[in-house]
Image (cartoon, coloured by chain):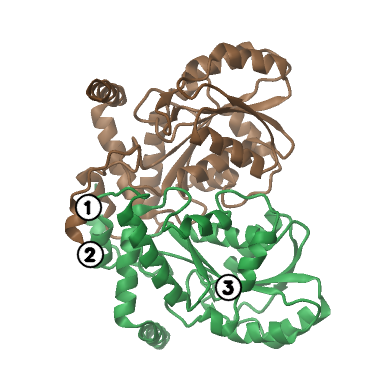
Chain colours: A brown, B green
């Protein structure tokens, strides 16, 4: 078992992050029936708390899968084969948005911005105004591969100002951002945000989340893409009853409830401030 | 936390099953880098042990997701839109095979056998002989919704005897079977077997597995279906280096390693005998 090796890990990667002992302990609760009353009540509490973290009145769905599963869910729910999408590529995870979109038949326009900085909102406005067929914009909040935090608020405003015959949806990967940096999706007008359990949310990997605002919820009912495991219509229906359509990672949901309680105790604004302080400390030290 | 409620659960459902204390304890190891040497070595040990459980010289891929994710992987890897498939439907999980195939554009022929018993191998031979366009047969090993165990060995032989211009692939859902009832896939000529972590494997839910024999491995390189998170080509490539293409559920892989050690200590044949004995006991008692 090499237990000593396991005990002395120092994790200095974007994720998985170290799991707080309280969270680990919660994950060890005896297994329960995922269609029983106890689990259903917990599931409702957890999704309500997640809405606070996403700062949305929309819906949050919990997917058993890596963050990439939630990214794929966002693509298959928002884009139909042949649709034109604009993908902001500033590193490995921007490239992933482009790859997933291509895998499902979208026409991808890549905007490769300078990897040393974020995508410029003014340029987004120009690009959308010049290409009114674009139905969705895929962006990365914190690009883990470069450490660049994009100005999602600015990009969302620029999208609104682009005009044209329709408003392109803004879909944001915040796998390494949500909980650590501000992303109040309703206030900023972001349509879809996806994240994972294993970074700022302090839970082991294996759960991912997609939060959908009003326009996104309307869109997913219209899209005809072939999908099943990541068909969020099934998650919405089951979620209304406090369930997941397929057996969820129960022990990780136990962990998540505890981690969300910790975040609520600290206060989300304080968690953002803690991450900002760590950023300053790291930059001062290297 | 309602800890007392959580402590006194009696689980008498097909799964999730109660998790042995050894397995729970293993899941609490400190988090590690999923792309580091420690995890890679463990991942290789785990996939080698899984090959023993599937009784295959083929490949086993580990997916972070519910059993349904592995079922979908089998469909998108083996079937192209427009392909004709035969689905054996004897309960809810047979219906799921049909639903997933339809979602991805297959032409589904449903064989609704008597839900009180298994599908008759002789009838499979007739159906395949009469319909040589069928490229794949989807079956359920243990149909959790009815408690019926199908004769997979007989069905596989019947498929071989059907003749015709090609041999249809046999794809088996053994989410509630593998580890509890015999399914030596190579010896029986089964092409794909999928299962989940939370039943006979005694691990919390959140991992699922697809085992692929030679014909299936050839097929997945040919299929053109749009797929990304469940594209098993990426899993094979990363797996060769002891990695998962996307962040895996690390704590559940810790748990899995311990559960597979327990199964190896008991001996797989003894685990099958234990399940048979429990079946007799339950039937005698009700």
On the rendered image, what quadrant is the N terminus of chain A found in? bottom left
| Circle 2 residue | A1
Q: Nearer the viewer, mark 1 or mark 3?
A: 3
On the rendered image, what quadrant is the C terminus of chain A found in? top left
Q: Tell me what residue is drawn at x 53 percent, y 24 percent.
A: A190
Residue B29 in the image: above or below residue A221: below
| Circle 3 residue | B213
Side (left or right) of B145 relative to B161: left
State how far apart marks 1 and 3 are (Cα).
Answer: 45 Å
Q: Position of residue B124 (x, y in %)?
A: 72, 82
Q: Tell me what residue is drawn at x 75 percent, y 84 percent.
A: B162
| Circle 1 residue | B3
Disc 3 crowd, CA 10 A, few/some/many (<14, 14-19, 20+): some
The chain identifier of the residue carrying mark 3 reads B
Residue A56 in the image: above or below residue B154: above
The chain identifier of the residue carrying mark 2 reads A
State which tag comes first along the sequence, 1 or 3: 1
**Is any atom of residue A224 visible in this view?**
yes
Disc 1 crowd, CA 10 A, few/some/many (<14, 14-19, 20+): few
Whether labels 1 and 3 share one chain: yes
Disc number for residue B38: none
Residue B220 location, quadrant: bottom right
Question: How many marks are shown on the rendered structure?
Answer: 3
State how far apart marks 3 and 2 are (Cα).
Answer: 31 Å
């Amino acid at each position: 078992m090499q237990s000593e090796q396991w005990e002395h890990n120092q994790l200095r990667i974007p994720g998985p992050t170290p799991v707080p002992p309280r969270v680990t302990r919660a994950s060890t609760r005896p297994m329960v029936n995922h269609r029983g009353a106890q689990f259903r009540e917990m599931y409702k509490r957890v999704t309500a708390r997640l809405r606070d973290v996403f700062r949305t009145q929309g819906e949050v769905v919990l997917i058993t899968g890596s963050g990439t599963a939630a990214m794929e869910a966002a693509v298959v729910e928002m884009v139909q084969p042949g649709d034109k999408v604009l993908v902001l590529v500033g590193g490995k995870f921007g490239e992933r948005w482009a790859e997933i979109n291509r895998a499902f038949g979208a026409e991808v326009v890549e905007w490769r911005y300078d990897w040393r900085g974020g995508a410029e909102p003014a340029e987004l406005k120009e690009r959308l105004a010049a290409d009114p067929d674009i139905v969705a914009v895929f962006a990365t909040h914190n690009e883990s591969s470069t450490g660049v935090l994009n100005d999602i608020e600015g990009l969302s405003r620029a999208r609104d100002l682009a005009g044209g015959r329709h408003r392109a949806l803004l879909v944001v990967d915040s796998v390494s951002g949500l909980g650590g940096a501000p992303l109040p999706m309703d206030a900023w007008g972001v349509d879809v945000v996806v994240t994972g359990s294993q970074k700022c949310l302090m839970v082991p990997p294996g759960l991912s989340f997609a939060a959908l605002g009003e326009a996104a919820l309307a869109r997913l009912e219209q899209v005809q893409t072939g999908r099943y495991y990541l068909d969020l219509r099934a998650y919405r229906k089951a979620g209304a009853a406090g369930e997941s359509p397929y057996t969820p990672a129960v022990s990780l949901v136990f962990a998540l409830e505890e981690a969300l309680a910790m975040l609520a105790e600290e206060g989300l604004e304080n968690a953002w401030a803690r991450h900002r302080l760590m950023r300053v400390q790291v930059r001062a030290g290297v």
